[in-house]
Image (spheres, helix red, strand yellow):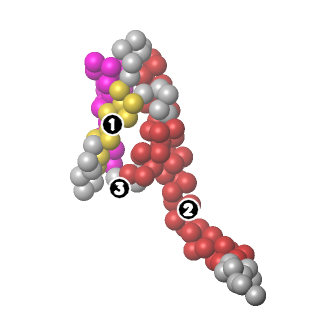
Amino acid sequence: MLEPDVLLHEGCVALTIDLRIYRLKAIKKAAYRLAERFTAVVETPTTETVAVSLRFKPTVSEAYARESVRLYFEELMDQELREEIAEETGPLRSLILAHAFSNLDVVKRDD
């Protein structure tokens, strides 16, 4: 049986994800990474949550659905951390790129 708050009903698992913990971008990226297991339908977010339904093929077992939900949350955490790191290192990456291209003459000039 699935966890009490994660129920497989008619081939679908309905989730409510807290946007104070996970960014919408991470939620979508995690769903995309597991697209071979299920189809994710992301609803319009409210201020603090977003409803996500994971839709499985009719032949999927409860164990497969449970494992897929576990993998989804594992991937969701990974994607959220990637977003956080990108945000924290963005200014440094921009500085490095600006420096790398600062000595290049990117405008083609006719001599």
Nearer to the camera, 39 or 72: 39
* Disc 2 to disc 3: CB gap under 8 Å: no
Amino acid identity at mark 1: Val
Compared with 110, 27 (above or below) is above
Residue beneath disc 2: 86
Please identify the residue farthest to the bottom as the structure is shown.
Answer: 111
Query: Which numbered disc, 2 or 3, marks the residue that appears first in the sequence?
Result: 3
Q: Secondary structure at mark 2?
A: helix
Query: Which numbered disc, 1 or 2, marks the residue that appears first in the sequence?
Result: 1
Q: Secondary structure at mark 3?
A: loop
Residue 99 appears in view:
no
Q: Residue at x 49, y 51 (%)?
A: 80
- Residue 26 appears at what percent x and percent y? 45, 49
Count of labels shown? 3
Q: Residue at x 27, y 50 (%)?
A: 45
Residue 17: mark: none
Q: Residue at x 38, y 51 (%)?
A: 24
Magenta part of the chain = 1-18
* Disc 1 to disc 2: CB gap under 8 Å: no
Residue 34 within the segment the image draws in magenta: no
Residue 37 appears in view:
yes
Q: Around disc 1, counting alpha carbons within 10 Å, would you say few (fewer than 14), some (14 to 19), or many (20 or more)?
A: some
Residue 41: mark: 1
Q: Secondary structure at mark 1?
A: strand
The quadrant of the picture occupied by the C terminus is: bottom right
Q: Residue at x 32, y 24 (%)?
A: 12
Q: Around disc 2, counting alpha carbons within 10 Å, would you say few (fewer than 14), some (14 to 19), or many (20 or more)?
A: few
Please identify the residue farthest to the top as the structure is shown.
Answer: 59
The quadrant of the picture occupied by the N terminus is: top left
Residue beneath disc 3: 20
